[in-house]
Image (cartoon, helix red, strand yellow):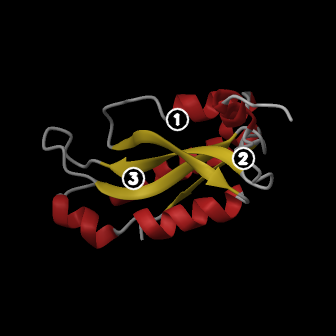
Amino acid sequence: MSVRRYSDAVTTGRVGEDRDRAVFEYALLRVVPRVERGECVNAGVILYCQERAFLAARAEVDEARLLALDPGVDVAGVRRALEAVEALCRGGAVAGAAGRERPGQRFRWLTAPRSTIVQPGPIHGGLTEDPAVEVERLLDRLVR
């Protein structure tokens, strides 16, 4: 019987005997219409799973909630910013030069702290059997 260190299990996505689940990381996308006030609305999720080479973002804007924080917010601009994040996660020519980077590099770039109207929250982790299902579950739980 071989003994595996916990750190080995985490980096390979294999914890215990549960061989169907993989480690993933995610961050919320928050809309902060007035940065000086610090109020935000959760508007999306970015999820990265290295083991499955998976990177995706899903976003939904609750326009009424956003306008309650700032009636003058550029909702169309917020939607465009969130669509750009989704496109960058998909990669390819549509995402420009950054779309050619590896998924992990794109995730790190997207989750780097910034003080713009669309900001990433802290990175969290977990285990999942299916990253595509997980991103929808997180969107349901944390955004909708």
Q: What's the mark number on residue 83?
A: none
- Split into 4 quadrants, where in the image is the N terminus? top right
Asked which secondary structure carries label 3, the reply is helix
Label 1 to label 3: alpha-carbon separation: 15 Å
Residue at 69 percent of width and 31 percent of height: 11
Say if residue 19 shows up in the picture.
yes
Residue identified by numbered label 1: 110
Query: Mark 1 is on which residue type?
Result: Leu
Asked which secondary structure carries label 2, the reply is loop
Mark closest to the chain's N terminus, 2 or 3? 2
Residue at 79 percent of width and 56 percent of height: 20
- Split into 4 quadrants, where in the image is the C terminus? bottom left
Residue identified by numbered label 3: 78
Label 2 to label 1: alpha-carbon separation: 31 Å
Query: Mark 3 is on which residue type?
Result: Val
Query: Mark 2 is on which residue type?
Result: Gly
